Image (spheres, rainbow, N blue to C red):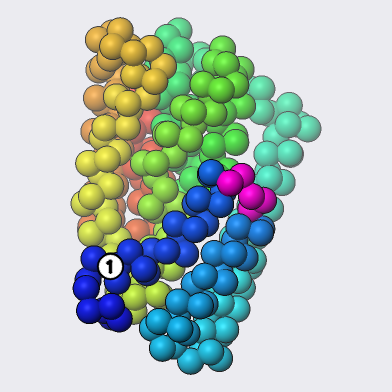
Amino acid sequence: MDPLGHLPLSALLAALPLLVLLILLGAVRMKSHWAGLTGLAVALALAVGVYGMPLRQAADGALEGAAFGLLPIVWIILNAVWINKLQRVGGHFDIIGRAFSSLSTDFRVQTIVVAFCFGAMIESLSGFGTPIAVTALILMTIGLTPLKAAAVATFANTAPAAFGSVGNPIEALAKATSLPAGELGAMVGRQSAVIAFLVPFALLMILDGRRGLRQVWPAALVAGLGFGAGQFVCSNFFVEQLTDLVAATTATGAVVL
């Protein structure tokens, strides 16, 4: 739809609720629930006032979105937090940290395995920021500062995010666009595979600058190739739900071997 008769302006108008949300969260530092409600109000106003959407239909869409956020997303997060708590109480979290440390004596290789490979495994099953929290804690146990651990974990999560939570973003996009999830997943996999290949190199730059790239580029190369190939093959020839799990397993095996 082009309500303004000018496609770039109409696209900018459609993105306004998201821009408002990002500005309120990032620049104004508003609490997330108030920022979300403000973004929702802007979206409803645009839908009804500019795009001519019936008020009841707009309200139904808002309620459906809220239900989609509360039910599957919150349920996944609760389970992920419960598993993390269980690991800590049982002492298994420290065991995981020591296991990753035993893979290599180089903290940069350890970081690729933990943040990029293991984080993608967690993202494939839970998503919604869970791998950032879990891997950042593990990275601190191998010597990274809290700030650098958080930055590395957050950046590493860009590679698997599109197929996180057993392909939940693809399913949501398919539902919103009425396009086949398999075709959407295949197209996303062709693009995200390229990004995934570059992420390990960027992680080395964050960790140790050019020296990190010069000294540990083989580990970044095999991790990026393994992950990108896994994403591309699984999303295009199998199912999008298992894409991150296959990619993370392939990348981990490539680095370890």
User: Looking at the figure, which quarter contains the N terminus?
Assistant: bottom left
**Residue 172, relative to residue 23: is it above or below?**
below
Foreground: 4 or 52? Answer: 4
Identify the residue shown where x is 60% and y is 21%: 146
Few, some or many C-alpha atoms within 10 Å of disc 1 (few <14, some 14-19, many ≥20)? few
**Residue 149, relative to residue 232: is it above or below?**
above
What type is the residue that disc 1 sits on? Leu
Q: Is residue 37 magenta?
A: no
Q: Give the image quarter of residue 174.
A: bottom left
User: Which residue is tagged 1?
Assistant: 9
Judged from this view, the residue extending furthest toward the right is 89
Identify the residue shown where x is 30% and y is 7%: 211
Residue 200 location in percent, x, y? 33, 27
Q: Give the image quarter of residue 201.
A: top left
Q: Is residue 14 left or right of residue 165?
A: left
The residue segment tinted magenta is 28-32
Residue 29 location in percent, x, y? 61, 45
Identify the residue shown where x is 39% and y is 20%: 206
Q: Is residue 20 visible?
A: yes
Q: Is residue 79 visible?
A: no
Q: Is residue 182 left or right of residue 146?
A: left
Q: Is residue 7 left or right of residue 78?
A: left
Q: Is residue 29 magenta?
A: yes
Q: Secondary structure at mark 1?
A: helix
Identify the residue shown where x is 45% and y is 52%: 164
Q: Give the image quarter of residue 170.
A: bottom left
Foreground: 79 or 246? Answer: 79
Residue 160 location in percent, x, y? 39, 45
Residue 25 location in percent, x, y? 56, 48
